[in-house]
Image: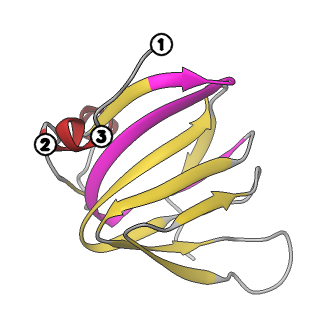
Amino acid sequence: METHDLHAALRTLGELRIGEATTEAEAAASMRMLTSFNRCAIGLVRFSGQTPWERHQDDEFLHVLEGEVELTLLPASGAAPHSTLRAGAVCVVPKGLWHPQHARATTALMFATSEEGDETSDAED
């Protein structure tokens, strides 16, 4: 059995301030991978700013631990719905949907996403 103290793990994370010059190496360094579960990587991240558009081969689970994040989903057709997720909220992003996350202030998330890889894009909506 493996246990993880999320509060202790969060204390070790710096904040990634996402901007035009943010590198993938900086983004990766701001994440703490905790474990694997059913072909998913489970980890933590603390950030502010807007993440690149991304999509995953499987559903993605998000749990807002601190702060709040705006999540935009880009469905195959229709308008892109926006949701604001506050501390304590959980959300499942359906597989294959492009989505960015925007945190106006420092936000901490726990995520579970496929270890099979994902796609990212710098495209703006």
Residue lying at 49% horizontally and 68% vertically, measured from the top left: 89
From the image, tell me which residue sits under label 1: 1
Q: Position of residue 112 (x, y in %)?
A: 55, 40
Q: Residues within 10 Å of mark 2 (few under 14, many from 20)?
A: few
Seen from this angle, which residue lies furthest bottom?
79
From the image, tell me which residue sits under label 3: 6
Tell me, yes or no, whether the two marked residues, 3 and 2, touch with CB atoms within 8 Å: no
Q: Residues within 10 Å of mark 3 (few under 14, many from 20)?
A: few
Point out the frontmost of discs 3 and 1: 1
Seen from this angle, which residue lies furthest top?
1
Q: Nearer the viewer, residue 37 or 58?
A: 37
**Quadrant occupied by the C terminus:** bottom right
Q: Position of residue 110 (x, y in %)?
A: 42, 47
Q: CA distance from mark 1 to mark 2?
A: 23 Å
Highlighted magenta segment, given as a residue range: 35-56
Residue lying at 75% horizontally and 86% vertically, measured from the top left: 79
Does residue 70 appear to the left or right of 72 in the view shown?
left
Tell me, yes or no, whether the two marked residues, 1 and 2, touch with CB atoms within 8 Å: no
Q: CA distance from mark 3 to mark 2?
A: 9 Å
- At label 1, the amino acid type is Met
Does residue 93 appear to the left or right of 6 in the view shown?
right
Element assignment for label 1: loop
Q: CA distance from mark 3 to mark 1?
A: 16 Å
Element assignment for label 2: helix
| Rendered image quadrant of residue 33 | top left
Query: Any mark on residue 94, and which?
Result: none
From the image, tell me which residue sits under label 2: 11
- At label 3, the amino acid type is Leu
Q: In the rendered image, is residue 18 in sight?
A: no
- At label 2, the amino acid type is Arg
Q: Nearer the viewer, residue 114 or 125?
A: 114
